[in-house]
Image: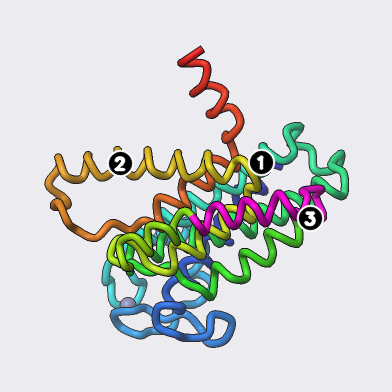
Amino acid sequence: MVAFVFILGLFVGSFLNVVVLRLHRAESFVKGYSKCLACKHRLYIKDLIPLLSYLFLKGRCRYCKNKFSHQYPLLEVVTGLAFVLVFWKVIPSLDLASATALQFIHLLDWWVIVSFLIIIFVYDLKYYLILDKIVWPGIILALIVNLFLGFSIFNLIFAAVIGGGFFLLQFVVSKGRWIGGGDIRLGVFMGAILGWPHVLTALFISYILGSFISVFLLLAKRKEMGDKIPFGTFLALGTFVTMLWGPSLINWYFSLFY
Ligand SMILES: [Zn+2]
């Protein structure tokens, strides 16, 4: 079952690569066929099998031998692993046959939400932009399914207001210099996914991850002080980590002090 979920994740990851590329080029991601970006040759199914095509063709285009970006196989594997982790979290027995209907809905919901988070992660990292086209549908989906799964509406609205308000405040204080409107809407999305109080856990984890990675990049001289930071990337990662391990991380953190 785990192998099946991993392969499903590879295929979804392959699709997410297409979504990121086509959102950037403002093309439809359901119509049209895939092309090599260098020689424009049409890519067929045999060229597009997740991971395997990349490995067999040694990361090159079959037709012009131009190198493909490492992003493609990397994103496929990351999505595969993320799908397995979510599956394990929602259905700890890893036995889909014994899952309840509610668990099954929870699983599908989280797979979709993780896919959205992966798009936000990659897109902000590459283009420094958090897409409303992804965030708004995400907010609506997370709210509806979480209500169904037993969250109270007050909890979710409060969490969304706290998540969005946290960035709105910085936006107002800095007159829009530190962060953009996309961060505010992503904060609302985080609240809608995680509810109260774990929206705070996710913000906390995102900031810690962001600081560590920024210091590392500064030390490695990959970034300079004052460079743009893809904050949506850290927020997406922090949200994912909180979905999987939020309660345990908070318990562990407070156990350090008491
Ligand atoms: Zn080519």
Alpha carbon distance from label 2 to label 3: 34 Å
For mark 1, does the 10 Å Cα neighbourhood hold few (<14), some (14 to 19), or many (20 or more) residues? some
Amino acid bearing label 3: Leu
Q: Which residue is mark 2?
A: 211
Amino acid bearing label 1: Val
Q: Which residue is mark 1?
A: 2
Left or right of 18 on screen, residue 251: right
**Principal secondary structure, stretch drawn in magenta:** helix
The verdict on residue 154 being magenta is yes
From the image, state whether disc 2 or disc 1 is nearer to you.
Answer: 2
* Element at label 1: helix
The number of numbered discs placed on residues in the rendered structure image is 3
Q: Residue 124, image x and y in percent?
A: 38, 63
| Residue at (53, 39) in percent of width and height | 201
Magenta region, residue range: 146-165
Tag shown at residue 113 = none
Residue 9 visible in the shown view = no
First reached walking from the N terminus: tag 1 or tag 3? 1
Tag shown at residue 147 = 3
Picture quarter with ligand 1 = bottom left
* Element at label 2: helix
Q: Residue 9, image x and y in percent?
A: 59, 54
Residues tagged 2 and 3 counted as in contact (Cβ below 8 A): no
Residue 163 vs 119, above or below: the answer is: above
Alpha carbon distance from label 1 to label 3: 28 Å
For mark 3, does the 10 Å Cα neighbourhood hold few (<14), some (14 to 19), or many (20 or more) residues? some
171 and 11: which is toward the camera = 171
| Residue at (17, 52) in percent of width and height | 223
* Element at label 3: helix
